[in-house]
Amino acid sequence: MTYIASANRYQTMQYRRCGNSGIKLPAISLGLWHNFGHVDVADNYRKILHLAFDSGITHFDLANNYGPPPGSAEENFGKILKEDFRDYRDELIISSKAGYTMWPGPYGDWGSKKYLVASLDQSLKRMGLDYVDIFYHHRPDPNTPLEETMAALDLIVRQGKALYVGISNYPAELASKAIKILKELGTPCLIHQPKYSMFERWVEGGLLNVLGNEGVGCIPFSPLAQGLLTDKYLHGIPEDSRAARPTGFLQKAHITDERLSQIRDLSSLAVQRGQSLAQMALAWILKDERVTSVLIGASRPEQLSDSLKAPDNIQFSAEELARIEEILAP
């Protein structure tokens, strides 16, 4: 059956300007880090992508190594792009990244010009695209001069392979330097993608100020802390949860009694606000005007539907904010 996007797709989503640029991003963006690889069910992730676009999500975020196996998320997205979204390409913001290990040898990792240019060429081929809208350096490289990495991003834009560039996982001081170099090269940094949630708040130690002062957008990833900030773990660790898997970033050891107590207290506050825990956790990040969008993942369409309601209420009273700090205090 031919996919036809909802005619009402732009009526409910909020769009927020990305720093000082001309780009607006949806308050909720969809990340393909998990659930879109060759190990996943194609019919399920196709439904998630359809629901996302039908709901006004115009931004799909990928990276060279997303899968598993690495590269498969881009391949699968490219297939659906060709079959279902071909007529909508100009309504989409598609991003990819390079910076983590992708192929063997000295040129398949980190931040050299050789790696970044080659990786994006591979990503474009996997997705069947002439260009991506945003290309990120995925993590700082301690052994490559920052000037070389930023020059590679500048080159990629001048080659027409990306419209905008960004950085990810850069601490405040290094982000400031990278932004300055890109500005001098004439290819401004559009956006920064850091890890940020109620349980991971390092960005508040200076990075958000840098981005706000420099007019650079911010799109936090893992805003739900790999699913911890959802109703999934209110009663322990479900057998089908990410934490129950033997591999991955979220392990059973991370879910302590203290953490479970915090999750339950936060959930109680969310209920008082008329929100699910996930909705409140996303709203808590979106309350900051320096944040352009939150990048969520979804393993089922129902999860996405729940998160889409988060921007409906991003107002917090002083009492609610104080209560959240009390719950999160170590």
Image (cartoon, grey):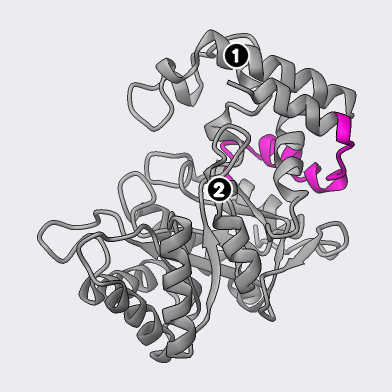
Q: Inspect this view and state whether residue 84 appears.
A: no
Disc 1, SS: helix
Which of the numbered marks, if any, corresponds to residue 260? 1
Which of the numbered marks, if any, corresponds to residue 205? 2
User: Left or right of 106: which side holds 70?
Assistant: right
Quadrant of the snapshot with the N terminus: bottom right
**How many other residues sit within 10 Å of disc 1, few (<14), some (14-19) or many (≥20)?**
some
Q: Inspect this view and state whether residue 148 appears.
A: yes
Q: In x, y percent, where is residue 215? A: 64, 73
**CA separation, marks 1 and 2?**
26 Å
Relative vertical location of residue 261 with respect to residue 92 in this rendering, above or below: above
Tell us which disc is closer to us: 1 or 2: 2
Q: In x, y percent, where is residue 170? A: 43, 58
Disc 2, SS: helix
Q: Amino acid at mark 1?
A: Leu
In the current view of this chain or complex, which residue is farthest to the left? 105
What span is in magenta? 296-319
- State how many labels appear: 2
User: Magenta stretch containing residue 316, yes or no?
Assistant: yes
Relative vertical location of residue 72 with respect to residue 222 in this rendering, above or below: below
Quadrant of the snapshot with the C terminus: top right
Q: Residue at x 42, y 89 (%)?
A: 185
**How many other residues sit within 10 Å of disc 2, few (<14), some (14-19) or many (≥20)?**
few
